Image (cartoon, helix red, strand yellow):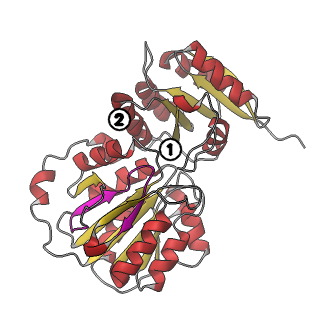
Protein backbone atom coordinates (compact mmCIF):
# COMPACT_ATOMS: atom_id res chain seq x y z
CA UNK A 1 0.00 0.00 0.00
CA UNK A 2 1.42 3.38 -1.04
CA UNK A 3 1.33 6.03 1.66
CA UNK A 4 -0.14 9.37 0.67
CA UNK A 5 2.50 12.08 0.55
CA UNK A 6 2.28 15.27 2.60
CA UNK A 7 1.29 18.09 0.22
CA UNK A 8 3.21 21.31 0.93
CA UNK A 9 2.63 24.85 -0.33
CA UNK A 10 5.77 27.04 -0.21
CA UNK A 11 5.21 30.79 0.20
CA UNK A 12 8.15 33.23 0.03
CA UNK A 13 8.86 36.38 -1.95
CA UNK A 14 12.48 35.29 -2.55
CA UNK A 15 12.90 32.96 -5.50
CA UNK A 16 16.23 31.82 -4.06
CA UNK A 17 14.65 30.97 -0.68
CA UNK A 18 11.80 29.10 -2.40
CA UNK A 19 14.26 27.03 -4.39
CA UNK A 20 16.13 26.00 -1.24
CA UNK A 21 12.93 25.17 0.60
CA UNK A 22 11.58 23.14 -2.32
CA UNK A 23 14.86 21.28 -2.73
CA UNK A 24 14.93 20.24 0.93
CA UNK A 25 11.28 19.21 1.04
CA UNK A 26 11.27 17.34 -2.28
CA UNK A 27 14.30 15.38 -1.10
CA UNK A 28 12.04 13.77 1.53
CA UNK A 29 10.11 10.88 -0.05
CA UNK A 30 7.24 11.43 2.41
CA UNK A 31 6.25 14.84 1.02
CA UNK A 32 5.77 16.73 -2.20
CA UNK A 33 5.67 20.45 -2.95
CA UNK A 34 2.39 21.02 -4.79
CA UNK A 35 2.71 24.77 -5.30
CA UNK A 36 4.69 27.97 -4.79
CA UNK A 37 3.59 31.55 -4.11
CA UNK A 38 5.52 34.80 -3.85
CA UNK A 39 3.10 36.63 -1.53
CA UNK A 40 0.17 36.07 0.78
CA UNK A 41 -2.49 36.93 -1.79
CA UNK A 42 -1.21 34.27 -4.19
CA UNK A 43 -1.00 31.85 -1.28
CA UNK A 44 -4.68 32.26 -0.39
CA UNK A 45 -5.69 31.43 -3.95
CA UNK A 46 -3.50 28.33 -3.97
CA UNK A 47 -4.73 27.19 -0.55
CA UNK A 48 -8.27 27.04 -1.95
CA UNK A 49 -7.16 25.34 -5.16
CA UNK A 50 -4.52 22.88 -3.91
CA UNK A 51 -5.72 22.18 -0.34
CA UNK A 52 -2.19 21.54 1.00
CA UNK A 53 -1.53 19.58 4.20
CA UNK A 54 1.14 22.06 5.35
CA UNK A 55 2.14 25.60 4.36
CA UNK A 56 5.58 27.15 4.81
CA UNK A 57 4.99 30.89 5.11
CA UNK A 58 7.46 33.76 5.01
CA UNK A 59 6.90 36.58 7.51
CA UNK A 60 7.74 39.61 5.36
CA UNK A 61 6.37 39.74 1.80
CA UNK A 62 4.98 42.37 -0.58
CA UNK A 63 1.27 42.64 -1.52
CA UNK A 64 0.20 40.62 1.54
CA UNK A 65 2.55 39.78 4.43
CA UNK A 66 2.69 36.46 6.25
CA UNK A 67 0.73 37.53 9.33
CA UNK A 68 -2.17 38.89 7.28
CA UNK A 69 -2.18 35.75 5.14
CA UNK A 70 -2.09 33.54 8.23
CA UNK A 71 -5.16 35.25 9.70
CA UNK A 72 -7.04 34.60 6.47
CA UNK A 73 -5.86 30.99 6.22
CA UNK A 74 -6.98 30.23 9.78
CA UNK A 75 -10.35 31.85 9.10
CA UNK A 76 -11.06 30.30 5.70
CA UNK A 77 -9.32 26.92 5.81
CA UNK A 78 -7.31 26.15 8.97
CA UNK A 79 -4.09 24.44 7.86
CA UNK A 80 -0.85 23.63 9.71
CA UNK A 81 1.58 26.47 9.00
CA UNK A 82 5.35 26.65 9.56
CA UNK A 83 6.61 30.25 9.57
CA UNK A 84 9.97 31.03 7.95
CA UNK A 85 11.68 33.76 9.94
CA UNK A 86 14.93 35.65 10.32
CA UNK A 87 16.39 36.38 13.75
CA UNK A 88 15.70 40.12 13.75
CA UNK A 89 13.68 42.41 16.02
CA UNK A 90 10.47 43.04 14.02
CA UNK A 91 10.43 39.56 12.49
CA UNK A 92 10.98 37.95 15.88
CA UNK A 93 7.91 39.64 17.34
CA UNK A 94 5.90 38.90 14.19
CA UNK A 95 6.87 35.23 14.44
CA UNK A 96 5.62 35.03 18.02
CA UNK A 97 2.39 36.75 16.94
CA UNK A 98 2.02 34.13 14.20
CA UNK A 99 2.38 31.31 16.72
CA UNK A 100 -0.29 32.92 18.87
CA UNK A 101 -2.56 33.07 15.82
CA UNK A 102 -2.18 29.34 15.29
CA UNK A 103 0.98 28.71 13.28
CA UNK A 104 2.25 25.32 14.43
CA UNK A 105 5.96 26.07 14.38
CA UNK A 106 8.66 28.22 12.80
CA UNK A 107 12.01 27.67 11.15
CA UNK A 108 14.95 30.06 10.88
CA UNK A 109 15.94 30.93 7.33
CA UNK A 110 19.57 30.98 8.41
CA UNK A 111 19.32 27.22 8.95
CA UNK A 112 18.17 26.49 5.40
CA UNK A 113 21.74 26.44 4.15
CA UNK A 114 22.96 23.88 6.71
CA UNK A 115 19.80 21.79 6.82
CA UNK A 116 20.55 21.11 10.49
CA UNK A 117 18.40 21.17 13.62
CA UNK A 118 18.95 22.92 16.93
CA UNK A 119 18.79 22.26 20.68
CA UNK A 120 15.09 23.12 20.97
CA UNK A 121 14.31 19.73 19.52
CA UNK A 122 13.62 20.94 16.00
CA UNK A 123 15.14 18.87 13.25
CA UNK A 124 15.77 20.11 9.73
CA UNK A 125 13.01 21.82 7.77
CA UNK A 126 11.64 18.56 6.39
CA UNK A 127 11.22 17.07 9.86
CA UNK A 128 9.54 20.28 11.13
CA UNK A 129 7.09 20.14 8.22
CA UNK A 130 6.41 16.43 8.81
CA UNK A 131 5.66 17.11 12.46
CA UNK A 132 3.43 20.05 11.56
CA UNK A 133 1.38 17.81 9.27
CA UNK A 134 0.26 15.86 12.34
CA UNK A 135 -0.74 18.95 14.34
CA UNK A 136 -4.34 19.91 15.01
CA UNK A 137 -5.30 23.48 14.12
CA UNK A 138 -8.53 25.42 14.55
CA UNK A 139 -10.13 28.76 13.78
CA UNK A 140 -9.91 29.79 17.45
CA UNK A 141 -7.79 32.88 18.05
CA UNK A 142 -5.96 33.29 21.34
CA UNK A 143 -7.37 35.92 23.65
CA UNK A 144 -3.93 37.44 24.02
CA UNK A 145 -3.86 38.21 20.31
CA UNK A 146 -7.34 39.69 20.51
CA UNK A 147 -6.56 41.71 23.66
CA UNK A 148 -2.87 42.68 23.40
CA UNK A 149 -2.81 45.06 26.37
CA UNK A 150 -5.28 44.81 29.24
CA UNK A 151 -5.84 48.35 30.60
CA UNK A 152 -6.07 47.20 34.23
CA UNK A 153 -3.01 44.94 34.15
CA UNK A 154 -0.56 47.35 35.81
CA UNK A 155 -3.10 48.41 38.42
CA UNK A 156 -3.96 44.80 39.27
CA UNK A 157 -0.30 43.90 39.78
CA UNK A 158 -0.28 46.14 42.84
CA UNK A 159 -2.57 43.65 44.57
CA UNK A 160 0.02 40.86 44.41
CA UNK A 161 -0.13 38.53 47.41
CA UNK A 162 2.64 39.27 49.94
CA UNK A 163 3.67 35.65 50.35
CA UNK A 164 4.46 32.74 48.02
CA UNK A 165 2.63 29.58 49.04
CA UNK A 166 2.91 27.80 45.69
CA UNK A 167 5.17 27.59 42.67
CA UNK A 168 3.53 26.70 39.34
CA UNK A 169 5.70 25.23 36.58
CA UNK A 170 4.13 25.51 33.11
CA UNK A 171 5.76 23.51 30.32
CA UNK A 172 4.93 23.63 26.61
CA UNK A 173 6.38 22.94 23.19
CA UNK A 174 4.75 22.70 19.73
CA UNK A 175 1.65 24.90 19.81
CA UNK A 176 2.83 26.32 23.12
CA UNK A 177 2.82 30.07 22.41
CA UNK A 178 -0.86 29.95 21.49
CA UNK A 179 -1.62 27.79 24.53
CA UNK A 180 0.32 30.11 26.85
CA UNK A 181 -1.62 33.03 25.40
CA UNK A 182 -4.81 31.27 26.48
CA UNK A 183 -3.57 30.57 30.00
CA UNK A 184 -1.15 33.18 31.37
CA UNK A 185 -3.30 36.31 30.82
CA UNK A 186 -6.05 34.71 32.90
CA UNK A 187 -3.93 34.10 35.99
CA UNK A 188 -4.83 36.56 38.78
CA UNK A 189 -2.11 38.81 40.18
CA UNK A 190 -3.32 38.36 43.75
CA UNK A 191 -2.91 34.57 43.78
CA UNK A 192 -0.21 33.57 46.27
CA UNK A 193 1.81 31.77 43.60
CA UNK A 194 4.96 32.25 41.55
CA UNK A 195 5.30 30.89 38.01
CA UNK A 196 8.10 29.25 36.04
CA UNK A 197 7.48 28.80 32.30
CA UNK A 198 9.51 26.54 30.01
CA UNK A 199 8.68 26.78 26.30
CA UNK A 200 10.89 24.95 23.81
CA UNK A 201 12.21 27.82 21.72
CA UNK A 202 15.59 28.86 20.30
CA UNK A 203 17.74 31.78 21.42
CA UNK A 204 16.38 35.17 20.45
CA UNK A 205 12.65 34.49 20.61
CA UNK A 206 11.79 33.99 24.29
CA UNK A 207 12.24 37.67 25.20
CA UNK A 208 9.59 38.62 22.64
CA UNK A 209 7.27 35.88 23.87
CA UNK A 210 7.65 37.06 27.48
CA UNK A 211 7.04 40.68 26.50
CA UNK A 212 3.85 39.87 24.61
CA UNK A 213 2.50 37.77 27.47
CA UNK A 214 3.44 40.48 29.96
CA UNK A 215 1.47 43.15 28.08
CA UNK A 216 -1.67 40.99 28.17
CA UNK A 217 -1.41 39.71 31.74
CA UNK A 218 -2.13 40.80 35.29
CA UNK A 219 0.93 38.99 36.55
CA UNK A 220 4.38 40.19 35.54
CA UNK A 221 5.99 38.02 32.85
CA UNK A 222 9.63 38.38 31.87
CA UNK A 223 12.46 36.35 30.41
CA UNK A 224 14.48 34.88 33.27
CA UNK A 225 17.96 36.15 34.02
CA UNK A 226 20.60 34.66 36.32
CA UNK A 227 19.99 35.95 39.84
CA UNK A 228 16.25 36.60 39.42
CA UNK A 229 14.36 35.71 42.59
CA UNK A 230 11.21 33.59 42.34
CA UNK A 231 8.40 35.70 43.84
CA UNK A 232 4.60 35.67 43.98
CA UNK A 233 2.79 37.29 41.08
CA UNK A 234 5.74 36.93 38.70
CA UNK A 235 6.30 34.48 35.85
CA UNK A 236 9.87 33.79 34.75
CA UNK A 237 10.25 32.34 31.24
CA UNK A 238 13.29 30.17 30.53
CA UNK A 239 15.48 31.88 27.92
CA UNK A 240 16.10 29.99 24.69
CA UNK A 241 19.25 27.87 24.79
CA UNK A 242 19.47 27.69 28.60
CA UNK A 243 18.16 25.31 31.25
CA UNK A 244 16.36 27.24 34.01
CA UNK A 245 17.67 25.99 37.35
CA UNK A 246 17.19 27.11 40.96
CA UNK A 247 20.01 28.00 43.35
CA UNK A 248 20.24 29.39 46.86
CA UNK A 249 17.57 31.78 48.16
CA UNK A 250 15.18 30.86 45.34
CA UNK A 251 17.43 32.50 42.76
CA UNK A 252 17.41 31.51 39.11
CA UNK A 253 20.53 29.97 37.61
CA UNK A 254 20.95 29.46 33.87
CA UNK A 255 22.71 26.32 32.74
CA UNK A 256 24.18 25.27 29.40
CA UNK A 257 24.44 21.60 30.27
CA UNK A 258 23.54 18.78 27.88
CA UNK A 259 20.12 18.78 26.28
CA UNK A 260 17.45 16.57 27.83
CA UNK A 261 14.78 14.98 25.65
CA UNK A 262 16.79 16.65 22.89
CA UNK A 263 16.01 20.18 24.11
CA UNK A 264 17.42 23.09 26.07
CA UNK A 265 15.60 24.57 27.96
CA UNK A 266 14.02 21.36 29.21
CA UNK A 267 10.96 21.16 31.44
CA UNK A 268 12.41 18.15 33.27
CA UNK A 269 15.49 20.10 34.40
CA UNK A 270 13.49 22.95 35.91
CA UNK A 271 10.98 20.54 37.45
CA UNK A 272 13.65 18.53 39.24
CA UNK A 273 15.20 21.66 40.71
CA UNK A 274 11.83 23.06 41.71
CA UNK A 275 10.66 19.80 43.29
CA UNK A 276 13.81 19.65 45.40
CA UNK A 277 13.51 23.26 46.58
CA UNK A 278 9.73 23.70 46.96
CA UNK A 279 8.40 20.16 47.57
CA UNK A 280 4.66 20.13 48.37
CA UNK A 281 4.31 23.72 47.15
CA UNK A 282 4.85 22.60 43.56
CA UNK A 283 2.19 22.54 40.88
CA UNK A 284 3.11 21.26 37.41
CA UNK A 285 1.14 22.08 34.24
CA UNK A 286 2.05 20.24 31.02
CA UNK A 287 0.60 21.77 27.86
CA UNK A 288 0.70 20.83 24.17
CA UNK A 289 3.95 19.56 22.71
CA UNK A 290 5.73 16.73 20.99
CA UNK A 291 7.75 14.13 22.87
CA UNK A 292 7.96 13.34 26.57
CA UNK A 293 9.69 16.32 28.19
CA UNK A 294 7.92 17.05 31.46
CA UNK A 295 7.19 13.43 32.35
CA UNK A 296 10.20 12.75 34.55
CA UNK A 297 9.96 16.24 35.98
CA UNK A 298 6.31 15.67 36.88
CA UNK A 299 7.35 12.38 38.49
CA UNK A 300 9.80 14.29 40.69
CA UNK A 301 7.11 16.80 41.62
CA UNK A 302 4.66 14.04 42.51
CA UNK A 303 7.30 12.30 44.62
CA UNK A 304 7.85 15.58 46.48
CA UNK A 305 4.12 15.87 47.26
CA UNK A 306 3.12 18.32 44.52
CA UNK A 307 0.25 18.15 42.01
CA UNK A 308 0.25 17.68 38.24
CA UNK A 309 -2.21 19.05 35.67
CA UNK A 310 -2.14 18.10 31.98
CA UNK A 311 -3.91 19.60 28.98
CA UNK A 312 -6.70 17.45 27.53
CA UNK A 313 -6.12 15.86 24.15
CA UNK A 314 -9.09 17.72 22.63
CA UNK A 315 -7.32 21.09 22.73
CA UNK A 316 -3.69 20.08 22.14
CA UNK A 317 -2.06 21.06 18.86
CA UNK A 318 0.15 18.01 19.46
CA UNK A 319 -0.90 15.49 22.09
CA UNK A 320 2.57 14.27 22.98
CA UNK A 321 3.90 15.65 26.28
CA UNK A 322 0.51 15.63 28.08
CA UNK A 323 -0.13 12.11 26.79
CA UNK A 324 3.21 10.92 28.11
CA UNK A 325 2.47 12.36 31.56
CA UNK A 326 -1.03 10.87 31.60
CA UNK A 327 0.11 7.42 30.44
CA UNK A 328 2.73 7.44 33.20
CA UNK A 329 -0.14 7.80 35.70
CA UNK A 330 1.14 11.14 37.02
CA UNK A 331 -1.86 13.43 36.46
CA UNK A 332 -4.06 14.71 39.28
CA UNK A 333 -6.16 16.69 36.83
CA UNK A 334 -6.71 16.79 33.07
CA UNK A 335 -8.48 19.79 31.54
CA UNK A 336 -9.06 21.53 28.19
CA UNK A 337 -7.06 24.67 27.54
CA UNK A 338 -9.86 27.11 28.32
CA UNK A 339 -10.09 25.75 31.87
CA UNK A 340 -6.39 25.45 32.67
CA UNK A 341 -6.12 28.87 34.39
CA UNK A 342 -9.11 28.10 36.61
CA UNK A 343 -7.62 24.76 37.59
CA UNK A 344 -4.31 26.43 38.46
CA UNK A 345 -6.17 28.79 40.81
CA UNK A 346 -8.03 25.87 42.40
CA UNK A 347 -4.84 23.82 42.80
CA UNK A 348 -3.21 26.75 44.59
CA UNK A 349 -6.19 27.15 46.93
CA UNK A 350 -6.08 23.64 48.38
CA UNK A 351 -3.65 20.74 48.72
CA UNK A 352 -6.50 18.29 48.17
CA UNK A 353 -6.09 16.15 45.08
CA UNK A 354 -9.22 16.24 42.93
CA UNK A 355 -9.45 14.08 39.82
CA UNK A 356 -11.27 15.64 36.86
Where is residue 154 shown, x and y percent of the image? 12, 52
For numbered disc 1, what is the local secondary structure?
loop
**Disc 2 and disc 1: Cα gap in Å?**
22 Å
In-image side of 68 versus 84 (left or right)? left
Span of residues in magenta = 230-246
Is 193 magenta? The answer is no
In-image side of 258 versus 242 (left or right)? right
For numbered disc 2, what is the local secondary structure?
helix
Point out the tag, 2 or 1, that comes first from the N-terminus: 2
Residue 332 seen in this snapshot: no
Q: Which residue is mark 2?
A: 93
Residue 163: numbered disc:
none
123 lies above or below 309: above
Which residue: 14% across, 46% down? 151
Q: Which residue is mark 1?
A: 138
Q: Nearer the viewer, mark 2 or mark 1?
A: 2
Mark 1 is surrounded, within 10 Å at the Cα level, by few (under 14), some (14 to 19) or many (20 or more) other residues, namely: some
Residue 52 seen in this snapshot: yes
In-image side of 97 versus 157 (left or right)? right
Where is residue 200 shown, x and y percent of the image? 48, 52
Is 244 magenta? The answer is yes
Viewer-side residue, 63 vs 212: 212
Q: Quadrant of residue 145?
A: top left
Where is residue 82 shown, x and y percent of the image? 54, 35
Q: Are marks 2 and 1 in contact (CB under 8 Å)?
A: no
79 lies above or below 12: below
Mark 2 is surrounded, within 10 Å at the Cα level, by few (under 14), some (14 to 19) or many (20 or more) other residues, namely: some
Where is residue 259 shown, x and y percent of the image? 55, 58
Which residue: 59% across, 56% down? 262
In-image side of 140 versus 299 (left or right)? left
Amino acid sequence: MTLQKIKVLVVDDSKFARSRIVRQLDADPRMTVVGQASNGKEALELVRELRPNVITLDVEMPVMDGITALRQIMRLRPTPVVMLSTLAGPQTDATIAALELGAVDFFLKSRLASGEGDDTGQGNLASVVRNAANAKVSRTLSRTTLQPDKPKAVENRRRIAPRMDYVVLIGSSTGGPKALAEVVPHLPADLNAAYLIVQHMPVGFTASLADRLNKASEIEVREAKAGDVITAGTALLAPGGFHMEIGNRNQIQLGEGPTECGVRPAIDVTARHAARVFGTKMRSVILTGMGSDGTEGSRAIKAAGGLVLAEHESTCAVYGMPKSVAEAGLTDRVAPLRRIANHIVEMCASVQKVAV
